[in-house]
Every structure is written in C-alpha cells, then in structure tokens.
Image (tube, rainbow, N blue to C red):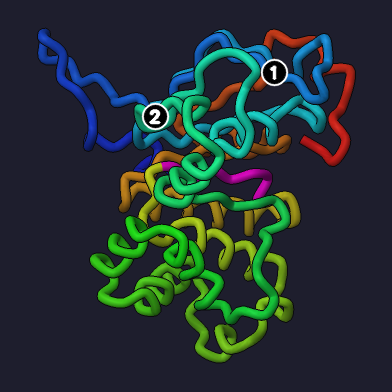
Amino acid sequence: MNAFAPFLMPQSAGRNVTMHGEVKPKAVISIADLRFSWNSAKEPMLDIESLQIVQGEQLFIAGPSGSGKSTLLNLLAGVITPQRGRVQVLGQRLENLTGAERDQFRADHIGFIFQLFNLIPYLSVVENVILPCGFSRLRRDKALHKGGSLQAEALRLLQHLDLDDPQLLKRPVTELSVGQQQRVAAARALIGAPDLLIADEPTSSLDSDLRERFISLLFEECRRSGTTLIFVSHDTTLQPLFSRSLQLSQINRSERAAVLPLKGGV
C-alpha cells in the first residue's frame, strides 16, 4: 500500500451535495481567461483559459525554470494581479481588491513556503513560527484555539515536523541545517491553519529520502486542518506522491514561457 494513500484524498468538509445526492468538492481557486505579462510584453508569460482547485486537494504543478511557475503562485497569492481575467480564491476576486486588502487576505488565508525559506535571522525558531499570527487576528485566534497558546501551537507543529529537540530550538535559525530550516518555514506557513498552503520549490536542496519524509509530514498536517496544498517543483519524481498533478504547459497557452526565461527565476 502506498504510504501516502491516507493523505491523497481531498477532505469532505466544505463539499456541496448536488440534487442527485452527489458530493461536489468546493472550489478554493478558480481561474478564468487569465493573461499576465511582465513589462507589457507582447506575448504574455501566462495565458490560462481555466484552472479549478478544490478544497483539500494536494496539487503538484511541474514545469522547468522560466515556465512561469512562481509567477502563477504570486497571482494566486495576490502579490501581483493579471492584466486580464479572473483569479478567485476562496470566493474572493483578488484583482478587485486594493493592494492593502490583498495583503490582509493573504495574511489571513494563505501560508507560503518560500524556496529560500525567508526566515528572520534575529528571531528564535519559535518566534519565526508564530510570526504570521502577528499579521492576522484570524490565524492568531485559530492557533490559540488549537494550542492554547501561540508558543504551544508552534511547538506542536515543530514536534510534528520532527523538530522537538529543546537544544535545537534554542539555536539561531542561521545555525540550523537546510532541512531543519525548511521545516521551520513549513511550521510558520501552517500555523493558524490557513485555508491554502503554497509551496514554491521547498525541497530543492534535500535528498530523496528527506524530500519524501517532508512531503508526508506536510500532507498529514494539511489533512488535519483541511488545508489545500499547491506544491510547485521542477522535480517530476515527486509527482506520484500527490493526489493530482499537472504540467504548467498543459494549461498555459503562451509560447513565451517556453523560450524566454524570466530574470530572477520563475
């Protein structure tokens, strides 16, 4: 039996029942007629007719460097907005919000695991984990409800991600290994049970055994909280671990992404 099998099915919470008694998953993300260009380029980086992601999914999106993966994630997180089309997350049209409103929406509903982790070097491990709760009362309240205190919930997540050594937690995050920093970044993204977790190449520095272990732990925590996971990577060996996968080229009609890599990496 596949060790990941218990984590591969979307959660039933939040699903709708049709008139015929069929269970219909609730859409967390809905994209329609999206076009996005950098610097007013004639050919868009992304040209996506449609994409639906339902609650509780663990979606793997693959694509080579320069194909627009990180650009898509930034659109889903409301960091940038398209020149045309609809990006709807949790029923909210992100392109209709102001920049400040998108920032607050992201803080309340989206956890993000960055490729380079982006941990704060002058904060402790636990302080790094609870940081999102300082920007979102919603996630703060959910973390307090689950753990009783922010520190207790941070420690629970770290323990679940195999970081339960008290001496280790006292070290500055800059003294942790890459794998340890990765798990701290994951705990930070997961605290307060965000509705959506976005992971941008988070396993690129790990060997295969550590990658699979990390993904298994990530699946389990997302399953517990009903969080939808979008995991982007160029490493297609990870693809079989996920309940659903797609190549970005399958949905991106733009030819520019295949021939013109974006500076800074996407």
Give the mark nearer the N terminus: 2 vs 1: 1
> Where 144 falls versus 67 (above or below)?
below
Residue drawn 35% across the image and 60% down it: 137
Q: Position of residue 181 (x, y in %)?
A: 65, 68
User: Which amino acid lies under the numbered mark 1 shown in the image of this protein?
Assistant: Leu
- Going 36% across and 72% down the picture, which residue do you hit? 153
Residue 232 in view, yes or no: yes
* Residue 250 in view here: no
Residue at screen point 11% across, 8% down: 20
* Badge 1: residue crowd in 10 Å (few <14, some 14–19, many ≥20): many
Is residue 46 a member of the stretch shown in magenta?
no
Q: Which secondary structure, mark 1?
A: strand
Give the percent coordinates (x, y) of residue 115. 70, 51
Quadrant of the rendered image containing residue 198: top right
Q: Camera-side residue: 116 or 90?
A: 90
- Crowding around mark 2 (Cα neighbors within 10 Å: few <14, some 14 to 19, many 20+) is some
Measure how far apart labels 2 and 1 are at the Cα level. Answer: 21 Å
Against 29, residue 101 (above or below) is below
Magenta segment, which residues?
Answer: 196-202
Of badges 2 and 1, nearer the viewer stands 2
Mark 1 highlights which residue? 46
Q: What residue sits 42% from the left and 61% below the top?
A: 191
Quarter of the image with the N terminus in it:
top left
Left or right of 50 on screen, residue 92:
left
Q: Which mark is residue 92?
A: 2
Image quarter of the C terminus: top right
Q: Residue 256: give x, y in percent of width and height.
A: 82, 14
Query: Does residue 20 appear left or right of residue 222 in this picture?
Result: left
In which image quadrant can residue 124 be found? bottom right
* Residue type pointed to by label 2: Gln
Q: Position of residue 17 (x, y in %)?
A: 15, 19
* Magenta residues, dominant SS class: strand
